[in-house]
Amino acid sequence: METTSSSRVGAQTAEALAPAPAPAAEPAQDAQTAPQQPPQPQEAAAPVPAARRTAEGYLRADFPWYGLDGAFSGPRWLMQVGTGADGTVEHGSTGHGDEPSARGEIATGEKERFAVVVTVASNPLRRSGDGTGVLEATSVSSAAWLAGSGLLAYSWPGQMDHALRNDWLDQQTEAAWELADDLGGDDWSTLSLPVDGEPTPFHYRESEFGWVLAGSTRGGVHLGAYGRGMSAYGLGFSVIDDFGAYE
C-alpha cells in the first residue's frame, strides 16, 4: 500500500473542480495531515462563461499540466487550481466535452458527455496549513481522491430532494476517500492508457455516477480523471503546451 490516510489533498474536493468565478483557488488546507473528518463537500459552483476564465493560475505552476491528447476534438475548458498554505499551486483540473452541472444526466435525463483531467504535483515535502511543519508527499491516492470527489460534485441521484444532497455528499465524499486510500482493493481494476504516447497503468473504477481513474506519469506528476458519457477506455493524455484551446 503506497499511501496512508494522510495522503489526502483536501480543501478542494467536489470543489471547486467546477468552474468558478473566485480567484485561482483557496488554499488546500491540511491536506496531508490525516484530518479527523474529510473536508466538507460544497455544492458545485455555477459554471462561469468561458470568456471569463483565464490560465493565470495554471501558468503559476512549476509542473506540467495534462489534458486529453490530440485524438479528442471536442470542446476544452478550464476549471480551477488548488494551492498550498504558501500559495504554491499544487493541483488543478481541465475539462473536456460538455460542461456538466450538478443536476445533470443522472437527475434530469439530459445527456452529458465529459471527461475531467486532474493534475497533481509530485511534492516530496509540503508546508502544513498553520506553517509549523511539513506534510507527507502527494501520491496516486491524492489524484484518486480529487477525481472521486470531483465526480460527486456533478452527481445527483434521481428523486433526491435538494435538502438531502449535502448529507448524501458527506457520506459519499467519505466513501470516495476510503476508496482512494485502498487502490489495491477489489473496487479497483487496472487500465492501461497512453500518456505522452507511452502505455501507462491506471487504477480504474466505475459507479452509477461515472468512472474514476488515477495513475502517475514519467514527468513527475500524478494524474486523476473522471467522467460520464465518454468511455475511459479510448482516452489518452498529453502535456498541455498551449492553454489557448482551453480559454
Image: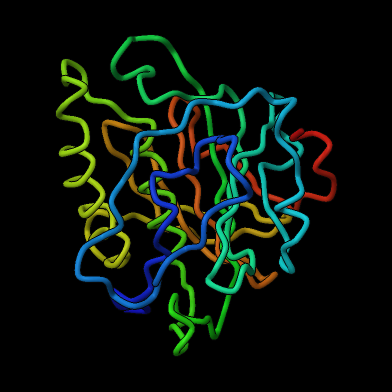
Residue at horizontal 44%, vertical 53%? 12
Residue 77, located in which quarter of the rendered image? top right
Residue situated in front as seen by the camera: 208 or 170: 170
In the image, 182: left or right of 234? left
Q: Tell me the quadrant of the picture where the C terminus can be found.
A: top right
What count of labels does the image hold? 0
In the image, 164: left or right of 114? left
32 in relation to 94, above or below: below
Residue situated in front as seen by the camera: 90 or 110: 90
Residue situated in front as seen by the camera: 20 or 124: 20
In the rendered image, residue 148, in percent from the top left (x then y), is placed at 37, 48
Residue at horizontal 46%, vertical 57%? 214
Residue at horizontal 50%, vertical 47%? 225
Residue at horizontal 76%, vertical 49%? 56
In the image, 194: left or right of 201? right
In the rendered image, residue 212, in percent from the top left (x then y), is placed at 40, 46
Q: Tell me the quadrant of the picture where the N terminus can be found.
A: bottom left
101 in relation to 68, above or below: above
Q: How is the image coloured?
A: rainbow
In the rendered image, residue 85, in percent from the top left (x then y), is placed at 53, 72
239 in relation to 86, above or below: above
Residue 154, located in which quarter of the rendered image? top left
